[in-house]
Structures are given as C-alpha cells and as structure tokens.
Image: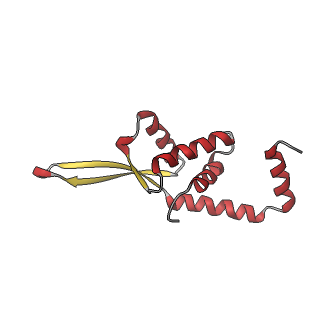
Amino acid sequence: MDIVTYDILYTVLKKLLGHKLEDKDIKNLAEYVINFFGYQDRIIDNMLTPADRDVFYYLEELEVVKPLEEEITISKGKLWRIHYWIYRKDKIEEILNQHMEEKKEESPEDFYKKLFEEMGEE
C-alpha cells in the first residue's frame, strides 16, 4: 500500500469503531486525519494543537498511527529532536485484508439486507 486514502482510512476506522461511533462521526474522523496527512506518510508533531494531539494518541491506541522521533545534530553539536506521526501501514493493511475476507464470505442475501438496513428501509 503506497498511499492511505480516505476510503481506506474510513474502512479501517469503521471496522475498529463501528460499534462505538455513528457512521457520520467515523467519516468526519477519517476526513480530519486525511486533512493532516494528505498524500504523505507522516506529519510533524509540532503542527498539532493539544486537541489534535489527543486524537492522534487515540488513533495510536487503535494502532492506526504511531509516533516517530528523529534526532539531528545542528551547529555546535547540539541535538535537535523532531517528532512525527506516521501511519501504521502494516496494521492498516491487516485490518483492510480482514475486512475484504469478511466481505467475500458474506452471502448476497446478507449484503442486500445490510444495504437496506443502512438506507433505513426494510
């Protein structure tokens, strides 16, 4: 997986949080996270507000992202630490594969029943 797209992130978050959050909240969370990352794999931590950082700590608990630290030597031998957040692509891919396997096992009757339930019709 090269790029984590909105659809991929939404699917993973839906799988992880579908029982806790409503669908619109999961969509908002996926969009919120994608707005930070864009097409990149990592973001720099110091661009986050404390509230944003709390969301990323929550995502870390879900194993969707993880912190990364890089040390750079600057002039006069001082050490500069840069903190990043990166996608856990291994975990994202694992959850996505589980989701795809479950979809393969789903019968057509179950698929349409679930579709009508999501649309609010029976």
Q: Is residue 74 left or right of residue 69?
A: left
Spot occupied by residue 122 in the image (x, y as percentages of width and height): 89, 45
Spot occupied by residue 50 in the image (x, y as percentages of width and height): 41, 34
Q: Is residue 44 left or right of residue 36?
A: left
| Outermost residue to the top | 51
Q: Give whichever of 71, 61 is nearer the camera.
A: 71
Say if 96 sits above or below 27 in the image: below
Q: Is residue 73 left or right of residue 45?
A: left
Q: How is the image coloured?
A: secondary structure
Residue 46 visible, this orientation? yes
Residue 20 visible, this orientation? no
Say if 20 sits above or below 91 in the image: above
Residue drawn at x 72%, y 61% is: 102
Residue drawn at x 62%, y 43% is: 26
Spot occupied by residue 116 in the image (x, y as percentages of width and height): 84, 48
**Residue 103 occupies quadrant:** bottom right
| Outermost residue to the right | 122
Residue drawn at x 84%, y 55% is: 112
Residue drawn at x 51%, y 49% is: 34
Spot occupied by residue 65 in the image (x, y as percentages of width and height): 48, 51
Q: Give whichever of 104, 38 is nearer the camera.
A: 38
**Label tally:** 0
